[in-house]
Amino acid sequence: MKLLYLLLGITLHSTLFANVEAGKKVFAANCAICHTTNGGRALGPDMNLVAYRRHKEEIAAYAKDPYEHYKAFGYSANAMPTLPLEDQEFKDVADYISSLQPFKQWMIKKKNKN
Ligand code: HEC
């Protein structure tokens, strides 16, 4: 039984890890021309800040279809192109972006108002 958990743990860990690693490659090839990851300036917003503000599901959704989401994300215009990638690649790249920032805005505890 212990062995089973161990194997399960390893498989789970390697799939989680694989997503971030695969996503890093997707990012380098498709996103890095317009997005920095170190607080820099480029055409699109820096991904470390995006990772702080957004859930990874939101990042994947925006990456897949920016035109559908730009208003809801607070932009008045959409300059990011719709990229011809696979669903899995959008998920992987969102995992990678999310991994840039371990602390999230949504983790901040609200003050008790009583
Ligand atoms: C040609 C430049 C360009 C490329 C390539 C590009 N983006 Fe963008 N991205 C932008 C711009 C500009 C914005 C600002 C909103 C807009 O114009 O749609 C943006 C916005 C975003 C946002 C919303 C950020 C937020 O929370 O406000 C996400 C997420 C995002 N991009 C992810 C990606 C990912 C992932 C890739 C690669 C798969 C990528 N972008 C490739 C230019 C680009």
Image (tube, rainbow, N blue to C red):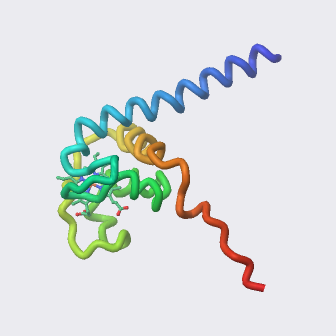
- Taking the spot 75% from the left edge, 22% from the top edge, the residue there is 5
- Closest to the observer, 27 or 92: 27
For this rendering, which residue is in front, 113 or 38?
A: 38
User: Looking at the picture, how far across and down is residue 77, in whole percent?
Assistant: 21, 72
Quadrant containing ligand 1: bottom left
Q: Is residue 37 visible?
A: yes
Q: Is residue 74 above or below residue 53?
A: below
Q: Residue at x 69, y 76 (%)?
A: 111
Residue extending furthest front?
39
Q: Is residue 51 left or right of residue 104?
A: left
Above or below, 112 against 34 in this view is: below
Residue 85 coordinates in the image, percent (x, y): 27, 41
Q: Quadrant of the C terminus?
A: bottom right
Q: Residue, x 35% and y 52% (percent of image)?
A: 47
**Number of callouts in the render?**
0
Q: Nearer the viewer, residue 89 or 37?
A: 37
Q: Quadrant of the N terminus?
A: top right
Q: Residue furthest top?
A: 3
Q: Give the answer, above or below, for where 111 lies relative to 7.
A: below
Q: Would you identify the image quadrant in which residue 14 lies?
A: top right
Q: In the orientation shown, which residue stands out farthest toward the bottom? A: 114
Q: Residue 64: horizontal and vertical position, in percent?
A: 32, 51
Q: Quadrant of residue 68?
A: bottom left
The structure residue drawn at horizontal position 66% and vertical position 67%, both measured from the top left corner, is 109
> Would you place residue 111 above or below residue 25 in this image?
below
Q: Is residue 64 visible?
A: no
